[in-house]
Amino acid sequence: MFDWLDPLFLIQTLGLLGVISIIFAESCLFFGFFLPGDSLLFTAGFLASQGHFNIVVLILGCAIASILGDNVGYWFGSKVGPKIFTREDSFFFRKSHIQKTQEFYDRYGAKTVMLARFVPVVRTFAPILAGVGSMNYKTFFYYNVVGGVLWSVSFISLGYFLGSLIPGVDEYITIIIFIIIGLSLMPAAYELLKGYRRSQSKHLS
């Protein structure tokens, strides 16, 4: 039932173009936060080490897709504007996601566009809120490019080098993918825990 969330299944089923399309979708569509971006890049890098993909084409394709995806998100946010804050919750949209992303902007400013690449959920909504807030496009584009390249290169290279250096690593790929997913979720979990503690403190006071 949840095979579509399994990076290995997705890559084997959809191939290189599928990987690039998913990276694009995760960067600009509301439902993109469901997609396993970090683990997908890692797994694709691992498979590239086994000869399934050309590593250069993979990195370039994913980096460009993530950059273009963020640009679409920025454009969407600029068109929708503040109305997004009054949008009703649905299966694909939660106001809590917007709030969490807004907290990142409050803390890191324009750098959120780059840092959000490494935080699931936030990376989907960061470019949208940049558009809503009318962030200077040149500033947005700079952090968008830097973040997209760093994100793609780091996770794909990690998978590639592990696959190249560790004998028999394919036997442990599923375990490694779960570790990558767990690590990628830690920042979001940390933010949720802090938010919960703040709400509890306010309630007690």
Image: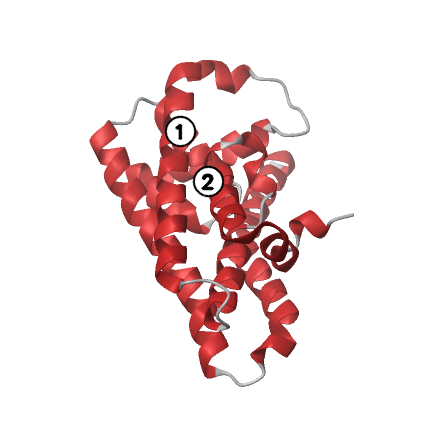
The residue under the point 51% across, 19% down is 85
Residue 153, quarter of the rendered image: bottom left
Quarter of the C terminus within the rendering: top right
Where does residue 134 sit, x and y in percent of width and height? Answer: 31, 22
Q: Residue furthest toward the left?
A: 138
Where does residue 144 sit, x and y in percent of width and height? Answer: 31, 41
Amino acid at pointer 1: Val
Q: Is residue 87 left or right of residue 72?
A: right
Q: Sequence-wise, which precedes: disc 2 or disc 1?
A: 2
Where does residue 128 sit, x and y in percent of width and height? Answer: 42, 28
Q: Is residue 164 above or below residue 62?
A: below
The residue under the point 61% across, 71% down is 173
Amino acid at pointer 2: Phe
Q: Is residue 117 above or below residue 90?
A: below
Mark linked to residue 196: none
Secondary structure beneath disc 1? Answer: helix
Q: Is residue 177 above or below residue 22?
A: below
Where does residue 195 sit, x and y in percent of width and height? Answer: 56, 41
The residue under the point 56% across, 40% down is 33
Whether residues under marks 2 and 1 lie with C-beta atoms below 8 angstroms apart, the answer is yes
Q: Residue furthest toward the bottom?
A: 167
Task: Say which residue label 2 marks.
Answer: 24
Secondary structure beneath disc 2? Answer: helix
Q: Is residue 102 above or below residue 186?
A: above
Q: CA distance from mark 2 to mark 1?
A: 9 Å
Number of numbered tags placed on the structure image: 2
Q: Is residue 129 left or right of residue 163?
A: left
Task: Say which residue label 1 marks.
Answer: 72
Residue 181, quarter of the rendered image: bottom right
Q: Nearer the viewer, residue 10 or 133?
A: 10
Give the class, few, some or many, for how many residues have Cα within 10 Å of label 1's Cα (few <14, many ≥20).
many
